[in-house]
Image: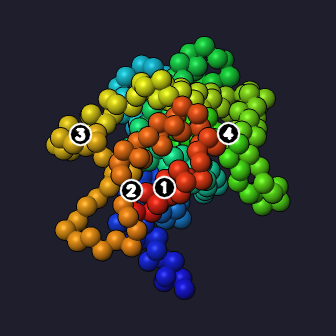
C-alpha cells in the first residue's frame, strides 16, 4: 500500500499537469535539499552547519536592508520557494497551499495559478522590504523567507472567487472560506507586533490575491507579462494560450465522454470571474469538473 501511495505521488508530480502540485513539490524538494545536508552537518560539525546556513540566508533570503537587496535582487523570487530550517514552517504552509490552491486551481487553472504564486510572493517580498524602512519592529539586519505571502494570495483569491464555498475541518465541521480568510487576516493584524515582517508579507500577498481576481473580472490580466516572459524563455509561441481547460485532441477518439468545447469553458470561467463560483448552475459545475478531469 505504501508503494502504491508513493507511485501515486510520483505520477502526480512527474506526469500530472497540476501547477499547485508542482509548486508544492518544488518547495518540499528545495527544503529537503537544504535540510538534509544541514542536518548531517549539525552532527558532524555544528560550526560548519552554522556557516553554511548563514551563507544560504545571506544569498537566498530577502534582506531588510535595501542596499544589500540591490546586490542580490533574485532574492525577491528565491525567498518564497525556500523555508527556514523548520519542518513545522513548511508543513503548515504546504497544507494551507494544498487546501486553498486546489480550490483556486479548479476554478482558474494552471496558468493563473503560476501567475498568482509569483505575483503574491513578490508583493509580499516588496512589502517586507518597504515596511522594514518605516517600521521600527523590523530589524534592519533581518531577513524574510517562506511561501506564506504567496499562499495568502491563494487564500484571499479563492475566497474572492467563492466566499461561501464550504470545506470541512477536523474538530470544526463545515466552515465557509470567508470565515477562514477573515480569521487569518485578523490574526495577522492583531499580532502584527510579533513577526512584523512576516505578517506584512502575508497581508500584502493577500491583497495581491484580491487585486488579481477583481482585475480579471474587469478584463485586466495582471499576470500577462509573466506568461509572455515564460513563453519567451521557453521559446513556445503559444504558451499563453495553454490553460488547465484546454481540450486535447489525439488521433484516436475513443473517449468515454464527449469532450467539452473550449467556448463553453471560457464562458463558464468568465461567469465565475463576474459573479463567483456559487452563481454556476449544476450543469455548468459538471462541465467544469469534467474538463478538469479530462486532463
The image shows residue 105 at horizontal and vertical percentages of: 49, 49
- Badge 4 density bin: few <14, some 14–19, many ≥20, Cα 10 Å: some
Separation of disc 2 and disc 1 at Cα? 7 Å
Separation of disc 2 and disc 4 at Cα? 27 Å
Task: Tell which of 73 and 279 is nearer to you.
Answer: 279
Task: Tell which of 260 and 228 is nearer to you.
Answer: 260
Separation of disc 2 and disc 3 at Cα? 26 Å
Task: Tell which of 78 and 205 is nearer to you.
Answer: 205
Residue 190 as seen in the image, left or right of residue 157: right
Residue drawn at 56 percent across, 15 percent down: 133
Residue drawn at 64 percent across, 17 percent down: 135
Separation of disc 3 and disc 4 at Cα? 33 Å
**Mark found first going from the N terminus, 3 or 4:** 4
**Mark found first going from the N terminus, 1 or 4:** 4
Name the residue beneath numbered marker 3: 231
Q: Is residue 207 above or below residue 234?
A: above
Residue drawn at 67 percent across, 28 percent down: 196
The image shows residue 209 at horizontal and vertical percentages of: 55, 33
The reply to whether callout 1 and callout 4 are in contact (CB within 8 Å) is no
Separation of disc 1 and disc 4 at Cα? 21 Å
Element marked by disc 2: loop
Q: In which quarter of the image is the N terminus?
A: bottom right
Residue 186 as seen in the image, left or right of residue 283: right
**Mark found first going from the N terminus, 2 or 4:** 4
Residue drawn at 76 percent across, 40 percent down: 179
Q: Is residue 262 above or below residue 178?
A: below
Name the residue beneath numbered marker 1: 287
Name the residue beneath numbered marker 4: 163
Q: In this view, does 119 lie above or below 132?
A: below
The reply to whether callout 3 and callout 1 are in contact (CB within 8 Å) is no
Residue 260 is tagged as: 2
| Residue 89 in view of the camera | no
Amino acid at each position: 500500500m505504501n508503494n502504491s501511495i508513493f507511485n501515486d505521488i510520483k505520477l502526480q508530480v512527474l506526469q500530472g499537469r497540476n501547477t499547485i502540485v508542482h509548486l508544492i513539490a518544488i518547495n518540499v524538494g528545495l527544503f529537503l535539499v537544504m535540510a538534509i545536508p544541514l542536518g548531517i552537518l549539525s552532527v558532524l560539525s555544528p560550526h560548519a552547519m552554522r556557516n553554511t546556513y548563514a551563507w544560504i540566508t545571506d544569498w537566498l533570503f530577502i534582506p531588510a536592508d535595501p542596499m544589500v537587496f540591490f546586490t542580490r535582487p533574485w532574492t525577491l523570487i528565491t525567498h518564497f520557494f525556500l523555508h527556514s530550517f523548520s519542518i513545522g514552517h513548511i508543513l503548515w504552509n504546504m497544507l494551507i497551499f494544498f487546501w486553498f490552491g486546489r480550490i483556486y486551481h479548479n476554478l482558474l487553472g494552471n496558468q493563473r495559478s503560476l501567475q498568482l504564486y509569483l505575483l503574491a510572493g513578490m508583493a509580499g517580498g516588496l512589502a517586507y522590504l518597504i515596511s522594514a524602512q518605516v517600521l521600527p519592529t523590523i530589524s534592519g539586519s533581518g531577513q524574510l523567507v517562506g511561501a506564506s505571502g504567496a499562499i495568502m494570495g491563494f487564500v484571499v483569491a479563492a475566497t474572492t472567487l467563492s466566499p461561501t464555498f464550504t470545506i470541512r475541518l477536523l474538530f470544526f465541521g463545515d466552515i465557509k472560506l470567508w470565515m477562514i480568510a477573515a480569521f487569518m487576516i485578523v490574526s495577522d493584524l492583531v499580532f502584527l507586533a510579533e513577526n512584523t515582517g512576516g505578517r506584512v508579507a502575508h497581508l500584502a500577498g493577500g491583497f495581491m490575491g484580491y487585486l488579481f481576481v477583481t482585475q480579471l473580472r474587469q478584463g485586466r490580466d495582471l499576470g500577462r507579462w509573466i506568461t509572455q516572459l515564460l513563453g519567451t524563455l521557453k521559446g513556445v509561441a503559444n504558451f499563453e494560450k495553454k490553460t488547465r481547460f484546454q481540450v486535447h485532441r489525439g488521433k484516436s477518439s475513443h473517449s468515454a465522454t464527449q469532450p467539452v468545447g473550449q467556448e463553453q469553458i471560457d464562458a463558464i470561467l468568465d461567469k465565475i470571474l463576474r459573479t463567483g463560483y456559487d452563481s454556476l448552475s449544476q450543469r455548468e459545475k459538471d462541465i467544469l469538473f469534467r474538463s478538469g478531469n479530462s486532463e
